Image: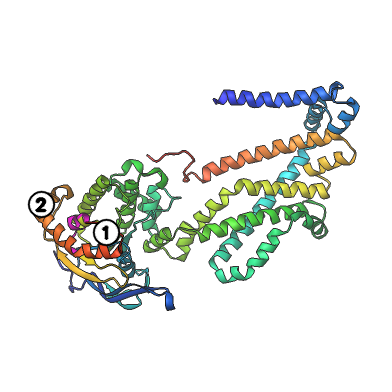
C-alpha cells in the first residue's frame, strides 16, 4: 500500500468512528440520546472542551507537571538502573544473593506502592516520580545487566588484545553495549515513566493530566474525561515520537530492518 | 631472514598442554606441544577441526594459561595478555558501535595517542587496506572481506612484534580469501613480523608460510609433522599455486594430515572410498 493510500484509509477509519459516535449521540438509533450523552459524551462537546483546555490555558500547567514527573522518573530510574545493573553484572556473587529479592520486587504490582509513596513523599510530584522510578528502574536494570553480561566474548578478547585496561574496556565495550540494550527499551521505559506519573496523579494529587481526568470522573463529567484522555494520548504519541528521534541518533550503528550490507 | 639481536625466538612453546573442565569431565585439548617461531618467520598450523589449533594461539597470546609447560614471547614468560602480540580473530571482533575509523583509531587511543593523531594514522592504515572510502561506515554496513581488512588494520596499526591469526579468512569466499592472502603477504613483506597462522585450508597454509606444522586430531592433540616451504618470496598466491613444487608440498602434507582428519570425523566416512 502506498503512503498516501494508507494515510487515506487511516483518516477515513478515524472519521468513520467519529461519525458513528456523533450519530448515536445525536439521533435515537441505539436508544435514549440523553443517556448515551451521559455515558459517552459527544464528539463536538469533546472537541469544544479540548479547545477550551488550550484556549483558557488551564491545560498547560497540568501537561507541564506530568511532563516533569515523567522526565524525573525516567532520569532517576534509568540512572539507578544503569549503576546497579553494571554493578551486579560485574559482581556475580552479589547478583546471585540478590536475585530472589530483585525478582520479588519486580513481581509486585506497582499500584499498591502508590499509597505508601504518598505517605512518604506527600501529595506533590515526588510521590508520582517515585512510582515511575519503580517502573523504569527494573526495565533499565534488566537491560543493562543483560547488555554487560552478553558482550560478545570475541569482542572482549579482541579489546583486551588491543591493550585495553578495565577502565578502557568499560568505556569502549561494556558501556556502549549496555547503552544499546538500554536504548532498545527506551520506548518502554519512557512509556512506563508516564504511566507511573499519571497513575500517581490519578490516585491523589492537585495537578497533572491524571488529576484532570480524575476530577472530571468524580463529577460524572464524561466530556472532561474523554477530552483528558484524548490530550493524554496525543501527549504520549508526541513523547514517543521524540524518543524515536533520539533513538535514531544514538543507535545509528545498528542495522535497520531491511538494511542490506553493500 | 634477519634474526633479531640476541637470536631469541619470537614465540616459544615448550611442553604445552591445555585441559578444560575438571574431574571426570576433563578434556585434554592439546598435549606436549613444542613449537618455536623464529623472528620474521611465518608459521602456519594446520590440523583437523577441533584439534586445539586456536588453543595454542590463545596460549601464546596470554588469553589461556597452559595447564602444563611454558610459553615465551620474545624471551619473556607469558603471564596475562601479551602486549606485543596482535591477534586477528576468526569471528567478528570489531566493535559494532564504532565506525571503521573509530575501530582502528581506538587501538592507538588506548595506548595514549591523541584522538587526532590516532585518527590520522587510522585513515592512512585504512587506505593501505583499500578502505579509504568506507572509513565512516559501521561494521554492519561492510562486507565480510571489508570487515576483515578493518580488523587487519586495527591489529597492524599497533605495530605488534608478533602476529597471531586464527583462521582469519575462514568465513570468506574463495576469491576474497585469495585477495586477502595477497594483501596480508604484501603488508607482511614490508616489515616481516613473526606470524603464527592457524588455518584448516592447506593451500592457504602453503601459499603464505615458511613452515607448515601439522597437528593430530584431538583430544591430546600434538604436532605430528613439519614441512619447510622454501618457495621463493615475494609470493603471489594465484601464481604460486601453479608452481609444480606447490603440488608436491600439497600431497606431502595431505599424506600426514589425511589420517588425522579421518580420525577427527570418527567413522562418518568409514564406508566411503575417500
Residue at image point 46% right, 58% down: A173
SS label for mark 1 = loop
Query: Number of labelled discs?
Result: 2
Residue at image point 15% right, 65% down: B227
- Residue receiving disc 1: B271
Q: Can see residue B40?
A: no
Residue at image point 37% right, 55% down: B91
Q: Nearer the viewer, residue B101 or B206?
A: B206
The quadrant of the rendering that contains the C terminus of chain B is bottom left
Does residue A134 appear to the left or right of A145 in the view shown?
right
Q: Nearer the viewer, residue B154 or B59?
A: B59
**In x, y percent, where is residue A185?**
59, 49
Residue at image point 50% right, 59% down: A150
**Residue B229 disc label:** none
Q: Earlier in the sequence, mark 1 or mark 2?
A: 2
Is residue B47 on the magenta stretch? no
Q: Quarter of the image holding residue B8?
A: bottom left
SS label for mark 2 = loop
Q: Establish whether labels 1 and 2 are both on one chain.
A: yes
Does residue B21 appear to the left or right of A191 in the view shown?
left
Which chain letter matches label 1? B
Q: Nearer the viewer, residue B118 or B48?
A: B48
- Residue receiving disc 2: B243
Q: Residue furthest front?
A: B271
**In x, y percent, where is residue A205?**
83, 48
Q: Count neighbours of disc 1 (C-alpha within 10 A) and say few if under 14, some if 14 to 19, many if 20 or more.
A: few
State which region is magenta. B203-212
Dominant SS of magenta comes to: helix
Reply above or below: B227 against A147: below
Which chain letter matches label 2? B
Q: Can see residue A250?
A: yes
Amino acid at each position: 500500500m502506498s503512503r498516501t493510500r494508507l494515510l487515506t484509509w487511516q483518516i477515513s477509519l478515524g472519521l468513520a468512528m467519529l461519525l458513528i459516535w456523533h450519530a448515536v449521540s445525536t439521533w435515537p438509533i441505539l436508544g435514549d440520546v440523553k443517556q448515551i450523552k451521559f455515558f459517552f459524551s459527544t464528539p463536538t462537546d469533546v472537541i469544544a472542551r479540548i479547545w477550551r483546555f488550550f484556549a483558557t490555558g488551564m491545560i498547560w500547567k497540568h501537561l507541564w507537571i506530568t511532563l516533569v514527573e515523567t522526565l524525573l522518573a525516567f532520569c532517576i530510574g534509568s540512572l539507578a538502573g544503569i549503576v546497579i545493573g553494571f554493578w551486579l553484572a560485574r559482581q556475580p556473587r552479589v547478583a546471585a544473593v540478590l536475585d530472589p529479592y530483585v525478582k520479588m520486587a519486580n513481581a509486585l504490582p506497582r499500584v499498591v506502592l502508590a499509597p505508601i509513596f504518598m505517605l512518604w513523599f506527600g501529595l506533590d510530584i515526588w510521590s508520582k516520580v517515585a512510582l515511575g522510578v519503580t517502573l523504569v528502574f527494573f526495565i533499565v536494570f534488566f537491560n543493562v545487566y543483560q547488555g554487560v553480561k552478553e558482550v560478545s566474548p570475541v569482542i572482549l578478547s579482541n579489546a583486551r588484545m588491543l591493550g585495553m585496561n578495565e577502565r578502557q574496556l568499560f568505556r569502549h565495550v561494556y558501556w556502549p553495549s549496555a547503552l544499546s540494550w538500554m536504548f532498545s527499551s527506551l520506548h518502554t521505559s519512557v512509556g512506563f515513566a508516564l504511566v507511573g506519573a499519571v497513575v500517581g496523579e490519578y490516585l491523589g494529587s492537585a495537578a497533572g493530566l491524571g488529576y484532570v481526568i480524575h476530577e472530571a470522573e468524580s463529577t460524572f463529567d464524561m466530556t472532561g474525561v474523554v477530552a483528558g484522555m484524548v490530550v493524554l494520548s496525543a501527549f504520549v504519541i508526541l513523547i514517543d515520537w521524540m524518543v524515536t528521534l533520539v533513538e535514531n541518533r544514538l543507535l545509528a550503528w545498528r542495522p535497520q530492518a531491511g538494511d542490506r550490507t553493500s | 631472514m634477519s634474526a633479531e639481536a640476541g637470536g631469541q625466538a619470537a614465540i616459544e612453546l615448550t611442553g604445552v598442554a591445555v585441559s578444560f573442565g575438571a574431574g571426570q569431565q576433563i578434556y585434554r585439548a592439546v598435549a606436549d606441544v613444542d613449537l618455536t617461531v623464529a623472528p620474521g618467520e611465518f608459521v602456519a598450523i594446520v590440523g583437523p577441526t577441533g584439534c586445539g589449533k586456536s588453543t595454542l594461539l590463545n596460549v601464546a597470546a596470554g588469553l589461556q594459561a597452559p595447564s602444563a609447560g611454558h610459553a615465551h614471547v620474545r624471551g619473556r614468560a607469558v603471564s596475562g595478555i601479551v602486549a606485543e602480540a596482535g591477534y586477528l580473530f576468526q569471528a567478528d571482533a570489531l566493535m559494532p558501535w564504532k565506525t571503521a575509523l573509530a575501530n582502528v583509531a581506538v587501538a592507538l587511543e588506548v595506548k595514549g595517542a591523541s584522538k587526532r593523531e590516532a585518527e590520522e594514522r587510522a585513515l592512512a592504515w585504512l587506505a593501505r587496506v583499500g578502505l579509504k572510502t568506507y572509513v565512516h561506515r559501521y561494521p554492519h554496513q561492510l562486507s565480510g572481506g571489508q570487515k576483515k581488512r578493518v580488523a587487519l588494520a586495527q591489529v597492524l596499526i599497533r605495530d605488534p612484534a608478533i602476529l597471531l591469526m586464527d583462521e582469519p579468512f575462514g568465513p570468506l569466499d574463495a576469491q576474497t580469501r585469495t585477495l586477502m592472502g595477497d594483501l596480508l603477504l604484501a603488508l607482511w613483506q614490508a616489515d616481516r613480523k613473526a606470524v603464527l597462522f592457524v588455518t584448516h585450508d592447506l593451500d592457504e597454509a602453503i601459499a603464505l608460510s615458511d613452515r607448515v606444522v601439522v597437528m593430530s586430531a584431538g583430544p591430546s592433540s600434538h604436532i605430528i609433522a613439519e614441512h619447510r616451504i622454501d618457495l621463493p618470496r615475494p609470493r603471489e598466491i594465484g601464481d604460486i599455486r601453479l608452481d609444480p613444487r606447490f603440488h608436491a608440498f600439497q600431497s606431502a602434507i595431505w599424506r600426514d594430515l589425511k589420517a588425522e582428519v579421518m580420525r577427527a570425523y570418527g567413522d562418518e566416512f568409514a564406508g566411503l572410498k575417500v
